[in-house]
Amino acid sequence: VESGIFADEIENVLVPQRRGDPNIISKDEEPSAVKISRIPSLRPAFKKDGGTVTAANASSLNDGAAAMVVMSEDAATEMGLKPLARVLGYGDAEQDPVDFTTSPSLAVPVAAKHAGVELSDIEYHEINEAFSVVALANMKLLNLNPDKVNIFGGAVALGHPIGMSGARIIGTLYNALKQSDASIGCASICNGGGGASAIVIERMN
C-alpha cells in the first residue's frame, strides 16, 4: 500500500470536515488497522477446540465502492476509448453450500474452457479470500503457483466489501497483469450458497 502499488486502482475520495479542508482518502485503510501483537491470542471463530479460522485469517467487512465500464469493441472504437482488457470467458459452478470455499476450483476450469485457454495459459489469479483457506485450498486443487496468486495481497489484508469485491479483484487482476507485463489472468470468487464465479481476461496493449 505504502509503495503505491494500488494507486492506479484508487480514486481519491474527499470527506468534508466541519472545519478546514476535506480529508482525502487515497488508500485502503484496512491494512493499517491490523494489530499484529493480538494475532496469537485470537480465538477460533467456528470451532472452539481445534478450530483454525480466527479474525486474523478471515476477511473483515468493509465499506467500499467500485465502478467498471463494460462495452463492445465497436462501441469503444466509436467513442474513441482505449480498452484496458477484454473478457475472454467466464463461468459459474456450484456444490453443497458447506463446501463453498472450494467452489472456485470448479468455476475456474469452466471459465477457462469458455475462454478457449488452458489453465497453464493463465499467468495470474485473483481468488477472493473470504477466509485465507479459500485461496490456499483452491491453489492446491488447481495446482497453482502461489507466486502467481493474489500477488498484492487478498481480502484478508485489504478487506471484503460485500457487493464490491468481484469488481475489486478484477481491477486488481488487471493491475497485476499490467505491472508484471503479463497478458492473461483469472479472477474467481465464491459465495455463501455453495457457488462460485470466475472470469478470464486478457490485458490489451
Image: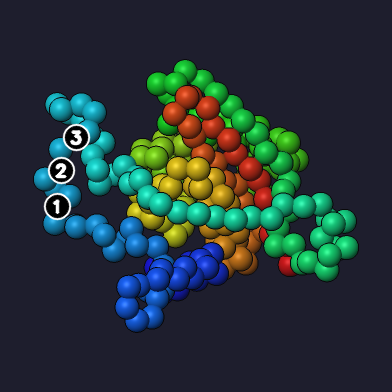
**198 and 8: which one is in front?**
8
Which amino acid, by three-letter code, is at mark 3?
Pro
User: Looking at the rendering, which quadrant does residue 97 occupy?
Assistant: top left
Counting from the top left corner in percent of width and height, residue 107 is at 59, 32
Residue that label 2 marks: 42
Crowd tier of the residue under label 3, counting other residues whose Cα lies within 10 Å: few below 14, some 14–19, many 20 or above = some
CB contact under 8 Å: marks 2 and 1? yes
User: Looking at the rendering, which quadrant does residue 180 occupy?
Assistant: bottom right
Mark-to-mark CA distance, 2 and 1: 7 Å
| Residue 38 circle label | 1
Outermost residue toward the left in this view: 41
Residue at screen point 55% across, 41% down: 188
Counting from the top left corner in percent of width and height, residue 25 is at 41, 69
Q: How many labels does the image show?
A: 3
Q: Is residue 65 left or right of residue 93?
A: left
Which amino acid, by three-letter code, is at mark 1?
Arg
Residue at screen point 85% across, 57% down: 75
Residue that label 3 marks: 44
Outermost residue toward the bottom in this view: 20
| Residue 172 circle label | none
Residue at screen point 51% across, 20% down: 95
Which amino acid, by three-letter code, is at mark 2?
Leu
Residue 193 in sight from this viewpoint: yes
Q: Is mark 2 on a helix, strand or loop?
A: loop
Counting from the top left corner in percent of width and height, residue 45 is at 22, 33
Mark-to-mark CA distance, 3 and 1: 13 Å
Q: What element carries label 3?
A: loop
Q: What element carries label 1?
A: helix
Crowd tier of the residue under label 1, counting other residues whose Cα lies within 10 Å: few below 14, some 14–19, many 20 or above = few
User: Looking at the rendering, which quadrant does residue 158 occupy?
Assistant: bottom left
Residue at screen point 20% across, 26% down: 47
